[in-house]
Image (cartoon, helix red, strand yellow):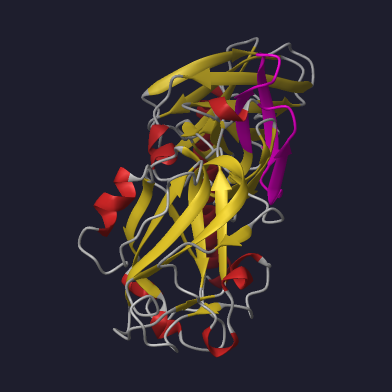
Amino acid sequence: MKKMKNLYIYVILGIGLVFSCSKMEDNFKDYLGREDKIYAGKVDSVSLRTGYNRVQFDISTSVRNLEVVRVFWNDFADSLDVGISGEPGITTQILDGISEKDYNFNFVSIDTHGNKSLPFSVPGKVYGEKYIAVRSIRPIKEIQLIDTENLIVVWNGIVDDGVFCDITYTDINDQEVSLRVPMSDTETEINDINAKLGFSYTTVYMPEEDAIDEFFSDVVQVQPEIAFELGKETWSLVSLPTDVRGDCYGGSIAGLWNGKTNDYYHSGCYGDVEDLIPHHFTFDLGVDANLVKVRLDPRTGCCQGRNPKRFQIWGISDLTDAETTLDSNDPNWEQEMIDKGWVQLLDHETAPSWNGSAEGYITNLTDNTSVRFIRYRILENWNGEPYTALSELTFWYGE
């Protein structure tokens, strides 16, 4: 009985096993009966280089039977077919005319049998006008004019993504010249420029180190001021009636052109009308010059509250019959100056920041008539005292 029971179990198991094997064989046959999915080989790598509304792909493949690499972007909405030689190597393709934004590019290989690979995804960014709009133009700190054919551009720092500045100018032979200046340069010397015509420049940017395009700022036009510092070797004091002596407290008017800021002219120790404010003095430049700019340096170490607040500069080429008789505080003083042939080159009030300042003060003259003799007149100082001081006067001339 026990043997019969065991035999029954074996028979049941055997039937089940046969049935199971038969079902697996049917499934396997069904699988074998279907056409297998064959994939083309994927690209090995893609190097992406950004540009101005475009991008470059360097596609590396090692599979021999590839025919096309189809590039997709905008979530597979747009595509471009790139022909492949069929041999391993690198194929370069530029995609033009695409919008400025971030992308996810997908590369699908297609072989000579029409089989496709799984996508190979590469992120990238394309730049354009929006990128340029937020870039800073490299500023110029100053232009040092040596003469009308030579100058030095002094740059004021660097800017983000800036790599060059491209300068364009007209040379002394009336030829246009282009000059590329690395962003690392702090100064640029130009030795053959027609400075009277000025120059222009653009800032050049690279958003990424290996970008295929350079990006350019708007063009900046620069017109250097044609002004040269006038030498003081020929200057001398001229003592005319009603001129201030200016020698108080160890001072001297001649100290205004000896190049030493610790020498100075000072008024206010005599108490007569010529010594108080307003007052004036006269000196000879030794040459006729078209003056364009003046610098006043205050007395150092003392008395910057006595810096001029309002002053005038007058000029004339010949002192013959140019002497005046009125004191500087006379309401008719200016008219007498005009009647005697003097030209008012400047009537100026200094900036409030010069009240108490030890720094030099520079301003342009408003009349550039050629003159030789200068009359300096102070009408008011900053602290309201009746006397004033200066340590140095400097003029620039133009052509």
Asked if the magenta segment contains residue 167, the reply would be yes
Name the residue: 41% across, 55% down: 313
Name the residue: 75% across, 32% down: 191
Q: Is residue 247 visible?
A: yes
| Residue 228 locus on image (x, y percent) | 62, 44
Give the position of the C terminus as an image quadrant.
top right
| Residue placed most toward the observer, 85 or 203 | 203
> How many numbered callouts?
0
Asked if the magenta segment contains residue 22, the reply would be no
| Residue 170 locus on image (x, y percent) | 62, 21
| Residue placed most toward the observer, 80 or 102 | 102
| Residue 143 locus on image (x, y percent) | 60, 45
Q: Residue 235 appears in which quarter of the rendering?
A: bottom right
| Residue 133 locus on image (x, y percent) | 39, 40
- The magenta stretch is 165-193
Name the residue: 27% across, 54% down: 334
Q: Is residue 26 visible?
A: no
Could you tell whether 223 is left or right of 181 in the image? left
| Residue placed most toward the observer, 218 or 128 | 218
Q: Residue 381 appears in which quarter of the rendering?
A: bottom left
Could you tell whether 155 is left or right of 86 in the image? left
293, above or below 270, in the image: above
